Image (cartoon, coloured by chain):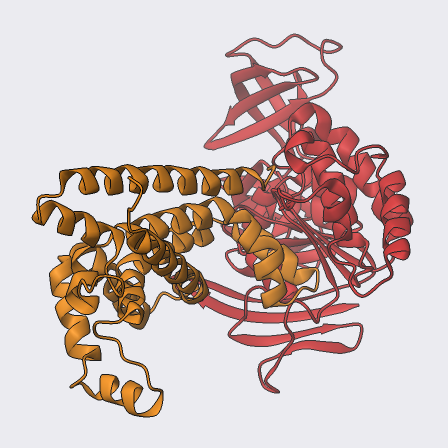
Chain colours: A orange, B red
């Protein structure tokens, strides 16, 4: 076990943590918008956001390739002006992980925002607090459980992604090969010992992180 | 001084009303779904009316023509919600202090402590709402809404979530706190006439999105001006009037074949005639020369403090209340009896 290559593990952690943070930053405002809105537009957005849960990862990966690949307008723009390449890079892996996992963040945050008693929000407004202030002092604390559940699911999904990541980022050793892909790769070349070790490490890491997130949830809220 | 006129349609329901309220407590009384809560929400700025005007002490909070709409944050309103709406993740102290912003910490804690004393909850500052009884929650909610020194205090059925036994003492508490600490306009929404009568100086009767009567509490209670108002204030006997004519200082009305004399009121052509069940006199013999009808006892209900009788008299069913329980004649079902309607107790009503 001495010369196990830990690169896939570190890459997986880096990718999934980055994707989770992005999912929180992008997903929670979307969830806030969706829980208040009730027009056709928001229904459409809601459906679009649920799509990654339903579609096979390869289909998703294909869409992302078409949208963000080197020949697409977006891909060319990113490459020419911002010097960002997505296909076959760790950035691509982050985007793949983000797209497959963000629906979980949005869905559970939206549900828990929607379940907050409107009288509490009204009370806070009548007591003179502005909307953003109410969001942080009332809504986030009361939706905390749902938000943490969303973070957990998002992280888990991001960490476990295989298909979409493979489609976009490929499986370049020491560059874009994440843990799930490394395990598949080990199995493919018949290295059972490596596969077993990687699976074991993956399991331990997952358990540790989920436990830590659970503790985070317990740290808040009395009511 | 509060001046309100509002229009809002929530098809098929239409709110269309105007009223004024002075300093002191004004009750808004009406059945559920009459627009009471919606009116409070419009006053607080939580709901936006389609049309109308809200002016509080000379400040225009809402005016549809001038396109003025103040947000709840801008209006100085205290709102006591039916379920108190305490923030469950904040302590009693944090709840009470929530509306105080931009003040130094020492001032905030001083004012919170003063309020804790006023509502007799010293020692409860670190508790959470889930650890409070209904009455305690209500007092915290009251302190929270009054600490910001609002101009207008809105109370939305504050006692409806509480047990009957503790309502009385809470009502006293609420009146004591408001009486000593608040000098603005209070609107008290309820569907309970007893509560409205005990608590307020003036009463507004709401029905189906409209104000159907308003005035001093005694007048509203004693002289409901319409059948619906009579229903809301608990006047059980309301009979249709088929014709009426003036005789001297009185009005004679015909109702289901009976002729009754009524002291003259502003309403010269009544559509209904009513009388409270405790104003009807029930006797074994004919005691008066007019307004006296013969009937039969068809129902007797024994209450804690009274007997309620239903008397059938030639097409009318009359409810009679006897509070002198046990002191009078014993009545049996089927007994013949006489009913007397004192002419100054009969109420003329419009549609």
Q: Along the horizontal axis of the image, is A90 left or right of A190? A: right
Left or right of residue A36, residue A220 in this image: right
Q: Position of residue A117 (x, y in %)?
A: 52, 49
The extreme front residue here reads A2
Q: Is residue A68 above or below residue A149?
A: below
To which quarter of the image does residue B131 belong? top right
In depth, the one of A53 and B94 nearer the eye is A53
Percent position of residue A83, x then y: 33, 86
Left or right: B294 as drawn, with respect to B197: left
- The quadrant the C terminus of chain A occupies is top right
Nearer the observer, B343 or B76: B76
Residue at point 57%, 43% (across, down):
B231
Residue B297 in percent (x, y) is at 54, 17
Residue B39 seen in render = no
Point out residue B266 in the picture as x, y percentages from the top left corner. 70, 59
Quarter that holds the N terminus of chain A: top left
Furthest toward the bottom, the residue is: A80
| Left or right: where B248 falls relative to A26 | right
Q: Quadrant of residue B281?
A: top right
Q: At 39% from the left edge and 47% from the top edge, which residue is drawn? A: A152
Residue appearing at x 53%, y 53% in the figure: A118
Q: Determine whether B90 is above or below A60 in the image.
A: above
The residue depicted at 84 percent of the width and 63 percent of the height is B103
């Amino acid at each position: 076990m001495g010369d196990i290559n830990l690169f896939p593990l570190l890459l997986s952690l880096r990718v999934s943590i980055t994707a989770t943070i992005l999912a929180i930053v992008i997903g929670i405002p979307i969830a806030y918008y969706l829980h208040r809105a009730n027009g056709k537009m928001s229904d459409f957005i809601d459906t679009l956001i649920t799509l990654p849960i339903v579609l096979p990862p390869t289909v998703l990966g294909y869409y992302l390739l078409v949208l963000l690949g080197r020949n697409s307008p977006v891909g060319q723009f990113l490459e020419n002006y911002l010097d960002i390449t997505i296909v076959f890079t760790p950035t691509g892996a982050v985007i793949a992980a983000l797209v497959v996992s963000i629906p979980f963040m949005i869905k559970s945050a939206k549900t828990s925002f929607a379940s907050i008693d409107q009288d509490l929000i009204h009370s806070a407004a009548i007591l003179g607090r502005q909307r953003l202030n109410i969001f942080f002092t009332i809504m986030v604390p009361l939706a905390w459980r749902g938000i943490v559940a969303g973070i957990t699911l998002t992280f888990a999904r991001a960490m476990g992604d295989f298909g979409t990541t493979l489609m976009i980022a490929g499986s370049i050793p020491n560059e874009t090969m994440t843990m799930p892909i490394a395990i598949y790769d080990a199995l493919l070349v018949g290295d059972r010992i490596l596969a077993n070790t990687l699976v074991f490490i993956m399991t331990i890491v997952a358990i540790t992180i989920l436990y830590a997130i659970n503790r985070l949830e317990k740290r808040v809220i009395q009511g | 001084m509060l001046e309100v006129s509002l229009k809002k349609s929530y098809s098929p329901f239409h709110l269309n009303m105007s009223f004024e309220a002075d300093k002191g407590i004004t009750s808004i009384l009406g059945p559920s779904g009459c627009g009471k809560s919606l009116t409070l929400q419009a006053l607080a700025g939580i709901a936006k009316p389609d049309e109308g005007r809200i002016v509080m002490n000379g400040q225009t909070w809402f005016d549809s023509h001038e396109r003025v709409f103040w947000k709840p944050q801008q209006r100085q309103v205290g709102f006591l919600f039916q379920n108190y709406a305490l923030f469950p993740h904040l302590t009693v102290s944090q709840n009470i202090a929530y509306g105080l912003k931009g003040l130094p910490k020492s001032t905030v804690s001083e004012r919170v402590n003063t309020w804790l004393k006023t509502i007799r909850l010293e020692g409860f500052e670190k508790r959470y709402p889930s650890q409070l009884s209904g009455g305690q929650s209500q007092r915290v909610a009251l302190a929270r809404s009054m600490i910001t020194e609002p101009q207008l205090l809105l109370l939305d059925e504050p006692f409806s979530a509480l047990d009957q036994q503790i309502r009385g003492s809470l009502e006293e508490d609420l009146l004591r706190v408001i009486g000593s600490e608040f000098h603005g306009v209070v609107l008290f929404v309820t569907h309970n006439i007893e509560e409205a009568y005990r608590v307020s100086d003036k009463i507004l009767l709401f029905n189906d999105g409209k104000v159907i009567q308003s005035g001093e509490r005694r007048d509203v209670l004693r002289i409901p001006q319409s059948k619906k108002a009579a229903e809301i204030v608990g006047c059980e006997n309301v009979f249709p009037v088929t014709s009426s004519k003036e005789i001297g200082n009185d009005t004679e009305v015909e109702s289901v074949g009976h002729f009754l004399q009524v002291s003259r009121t502003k309403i010269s052509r009544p559509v209904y005639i009513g009388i409270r069940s405790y104003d009807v006199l029930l006797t074994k013999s004919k005691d008066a020369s007019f307004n006296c009808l013969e009937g039969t006892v068809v129902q007797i209900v024994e209450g804690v403090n009274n007997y309620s009788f239903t008397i059938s008299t030639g097409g009318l069913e009359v409810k009679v209340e006897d509070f002198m329980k046990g002191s009078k004649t014993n009545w049996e079902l089927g007994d013949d009896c006489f009913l007397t309607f004192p002419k100054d107790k009969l109420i003329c009503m419009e549609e």
